[in-house]
Image (cartoon, helix red, strand yellow):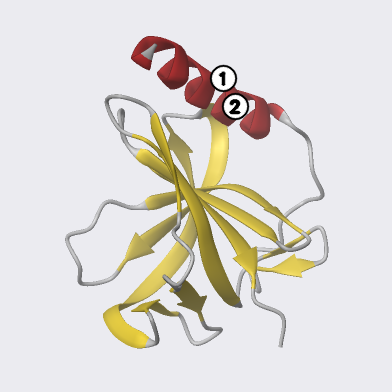
Amino acid sequence: MKGIKLSIVILLALLLSACKSSPTNETNFTTNNTSIFNDWLLRQTSGGIGGATMTIPEGTKLVLSMSVDSIYREYRNDTLVFQDGFTIRPAISIYSADSLSVIDFKTSKRFNFVVLHLMNDTLILADNMYDGYSYLYTRIKR
């Protein structure tokens, strides 16, 4: 069963990366009329060795904030838990032979994230490593 879940996650990642979308403007990182520079609410994670999917429990608010001045912040229930500068650059990843947009942190030793999907109110990021996780976010409307 674990192998099936992992296969589904990998297949989903490959399908998403194979989809053609509007060209990315690397200056302000906007695709399909959606800017990555927003506040994003984490809805679901999936991956790891077992390929488990976890929906974020009600009452838990995990927010990713990416600002135009290149500051990446993570909040847990309105408390800042991580902050660092970041850059977005095209790079080869484990998800595609083509270049995908990768988020690199300036000072943290965290693994970088691959932007797998950015459209309308949905953002999917993934760890750029095998047995890593993918993260499904929805844009917080202000």
Task: Answer yes or no: is residue 40 visible.
Answer: yes
Give the vertical position of 71 relative to 6 (above or below). Answer: below
Residue type indicated by callout 2: Leu
The C terminus, quarter of image: bottom right
Which of the 4 quarters of the picture holds residue 103?
Answer: bottom left
Provide the residue designation for mark 2.
12
Q: Name the residue at 43% across, 68% down.
A: 87
Q: Determine the secondary structure under disc 2.
A: helix
Kindly report the distance in space between the C-alpha atoms of the residues bearing marks 1 and 2. Answer: 4 Å
Disc 1 to disc 2: CB gap under 8 Å: yes
- Lateral position of residue 111 relative to residue 1, left or right: left
Q: Residues within 10 Å of mark 1 (few under 14, many from 20)?
A: few
- In-image side of 23 versus 29 (left or right): right
Residue that label 1 marks: 11
SS at mark 1?
A: helix
Q: Nearer the viewer, residue 89 or 44?
A: 44
Left or right of 9: which side holds 33?
right
Quarter of the image where one finds residue 119: bottom right
* Kind of residue indicated by mark 1: Leu
Residue drawn at x 43%, y 35% as measured from the top left:
93
